[in-house]
Image (spheres, grey):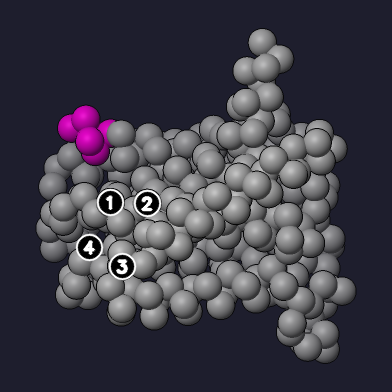
């Protein structure tokens, strides 16, 4: 039983689960626009997510929330290097326009983790994007929307029409709400200078805003020109899951509440669409 827990902890701490969530959202975009399964771009997104998240967590001065993570650090570093090699392999199979777009996202990821910005622009001692007061959650939501919506479509040479903009806005709102349980959990860890949403307005108001954003997420579904019924039902179910994840979020969470159950909403969304 202990061995199974160690494997599961590695699955979470090495960012495989969050990468799977990003992969599922990107696949949802292809399904939404009736595009074929693109192994190259989806596998690139999966391995790039592991590489990027682990880079931020273990090389970007992120705080460790669990002491037990230290014993896995070397294994995770080796695993991350393997994923980096796989990421490079699939990157070489993408078109040139996609690679240029990825380069821009890579710069944002790098600045998010590495202290290069002038300290006078920041309110915290760490000179990187993630430490600028109040912007962390918006950067994450923006990057997720760009990676999971625009990246698969650019590689497929798909025209950026009105529905693409609506889907990207919906995805941005989805990730924003998805981050709220994490921000509530991290109240006991984050520097007060980060000015996260729960730090600024409190847990209760954060949940109120989250409920409002879930409503926007669902209503955006009806602004799309192409609106299959099963997508409406999927958005309804995802909205309910978001509400539950938000309402049950608290500072003293179980170890896997946000890191596994909340992150799993993206996976459930894809599974529902595939089954229907």
Q: Is residue 187 one of those drawn in magenta?
A: no
Left or right position of 142 against 121:
left
Ranked by sequence position, the earlier of labels 4 and 3 is 3
Look at the numbered discs 4 and 3 and tell me whether their residues touch, using CB distance below 8 Å: no
The prevailing secondary structure element of the residues shown in magenta is helix
Circle 3 — which element? loop
Q: CA distance from mark 4 to mark 3?
A: 31 Å
The residue labelled by disc 1 is: 39
Look at the numbered discs 2 and 1 and tell me whether their residues touch, using CB distance below 8 Å: yes
Ranked by sequence position, the earlier of labels 1 and 4 is 1
Q: CA distance from mark 1 to mark 4?
A: 29 Å
98 or 272, nearer to the observer: 98
Q: Is residue 233 visible?
A: no
Ranked by sequence position, the earlier of labels 2 and 4 is 2
Q: CA distance from mark 2 to mark 3?
A: 11 Å
Left or right position of 132 against 20:
right
Q: Position of residue 204 (x, y in %)?
A: 67, 47
Ranked by sequence position, the earlier of labels 2 and 3 is 2
Circle 2 — which element? helix
Circle 1 — which element? helix
User: What stretch of residues is rendered in magenta?
Assistant: 272-276
Residue at left offset 31%, top offset 64%: 93
Q: Position of residue 127 (x, y in %)?
A: 78, 77
Residue at left offset 44%, top offset 38%: 265
Q: Position of residue 261 (x, y in %)?
A: 54, 33
The residue labelled by disc 3 is: 94
Ranked by sequence position, the earlier of labels 3 and 1 is 1
The residue labelled by disc 4 is: 223
Q: Is residue 127 visible?
A: yes
61 or 214, nearer to the observer: 61
Tally of numbered discs: 4
> Viewer-nearest of labels 4 and 3?
3
């Amino acid at each position: 039983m202990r061995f199974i827990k160690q494997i599961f902890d590695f699955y979470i701490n090495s960012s495989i689960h969050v990468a799977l969530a990003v992969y599922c959202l990107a696949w949802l975009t292809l399904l939404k626009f009736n595009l074929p399964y693109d192994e190259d771009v989806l596998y690139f997104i999966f391995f790039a997510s592991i590489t990027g998240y682990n880079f931020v967590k273990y090389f970007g001065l992120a705080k460790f929330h669990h002491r037990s993570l230290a014993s896995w650090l070397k294994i995770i570093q080796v695993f991350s290097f393997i994923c980096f090699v796989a990421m490079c392999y699939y990157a070489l199979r993408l078109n040139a326009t996609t690679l240029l777009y990825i380069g821009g996202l890579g710069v944002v990821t790098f600045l998010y983790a590495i202290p290069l910005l002038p300290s006078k622009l920041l309110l915290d001692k760490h000179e990187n994007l993630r430490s600028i007061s109040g912007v962390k959650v918006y950067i994450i939501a923006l990057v997720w929307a760009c990676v999971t919506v625009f990246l698969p479509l650019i590689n497929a040479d798909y025209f950026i029409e009105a529905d693409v903009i609506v889907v990207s806005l919906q995805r941005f709102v989805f990730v924003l709400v998805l981050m709220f349980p994490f921000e509530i959990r991290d109240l006991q860890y984050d520097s007060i200078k980060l000015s996260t949403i729960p730090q600024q307005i409190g847990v209760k108001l954060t949940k109120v805003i989250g409920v409002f954003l879930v409503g926007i997420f669902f209503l955006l579904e009806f602004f799309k020109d192409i609106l299959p019924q099963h997508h409406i039902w999927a958005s309804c179910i995802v909205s309910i899951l978001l509400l539950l994840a938000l309402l049950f979020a608290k500072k003293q969470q179980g170890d896997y509440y946000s890191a596994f159950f909340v992150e799993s909403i993206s996976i459930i969304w894809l599974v529902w669409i595939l089954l229907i």
